[in-house]
């Protein structure tokens, strides 16, 4: 097992991220609702750099009284990252994609004395 120093805890603000090389792997570290999450930077679709995609809240499409979608709304409770290659979306906290069929591969983190480490 190897540990890689990423940065100090303060360097990843809530809603932020950092993508780092750890040996021959790339890991994306995100902070959502104050909690750190780490994922391998490989999209399950075609191995695109998922951790470098746009971060935004889940898009929901509420139905009106006629059962039609009139507006898009955002659910700030579920933050997603969208793969820059083909747009697949993944929940940053769970690693599940919007359809629930695919998952990101989690990386282990350790935090000691204010420093974040990836453990592989
Ligand atoms: S490689 Fe990520 S959506 Fe295709």
Image (tube, rainbow, N blue to C red):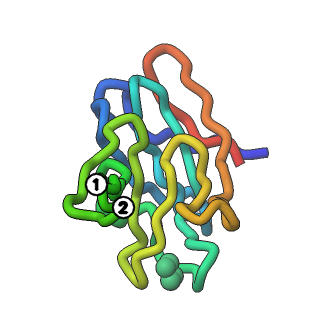
Dot 2 and dot 1 residues touching (CB under 8 Å): yes
Describe the element under mark 1 as helix, strand or loop.
loop
Q: Looking at the rendering, which quadrant does residue 83 occupy? A: bottom left
Residue under the image location 49 percent in, 32 percent down: 36
Per the model, the C-alpha gap separating discs 2 and 1 is: 5 Å
Asked if residue 61 can be seen in this view, the reply is yes
Asked if residue 59 can be seen in this view, the reply is no
Describe the element under mark 2 as helix, strand or loop.
loop
In the rendered image, residue 1, in percent from the top left (x then y), is placed at: 79, 45
The residue sitting at the front extreme is 66
Residue under the image location 53 percent in, 39 percent down: 37
Disc 2: CA contacts within 10 A as few (<14), some (14-19) or many (>=20) = few
The answer to which of 96 and 75 lies nearer the viewer is: 75
The answer to which of 113 and 94 lies nearer the viewer is: 94
The reply, left or right, for residue 6 in relation to residue 68 is right
Residue under the image location 50 percent in, 59 percent down: 90
Which numbered dot is residue 67?
2
Which numbered dot is residue 113?
none
Location of mark 1 (residue): 64
């Amino acid at each position: 097992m190897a540990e890689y120093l990423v940065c100090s805890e303060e360097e990843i603000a809530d809603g932020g991220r950092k993508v780092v090389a750890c040996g021959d792997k790339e890991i994306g570290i995100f902070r959502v609702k104050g909690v750190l999450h780490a994922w391998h930077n490989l999209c399950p679709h075609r191995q695109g750099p998922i951790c470098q995609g746009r971060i935004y809240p889940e898009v929901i499409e509420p139905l009106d009284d006629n059962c039609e979608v009139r507006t898009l709304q955002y659910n700030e409770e579920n933050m997603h990252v969208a793969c820059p290659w083909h747009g697949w979306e993944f929940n940053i906290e769970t690693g599940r994609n919007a359809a629930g069929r695919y998952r990101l591969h989690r990386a282990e983190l350790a935090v000691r004395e204010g420093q974040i480490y990836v453990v592989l």
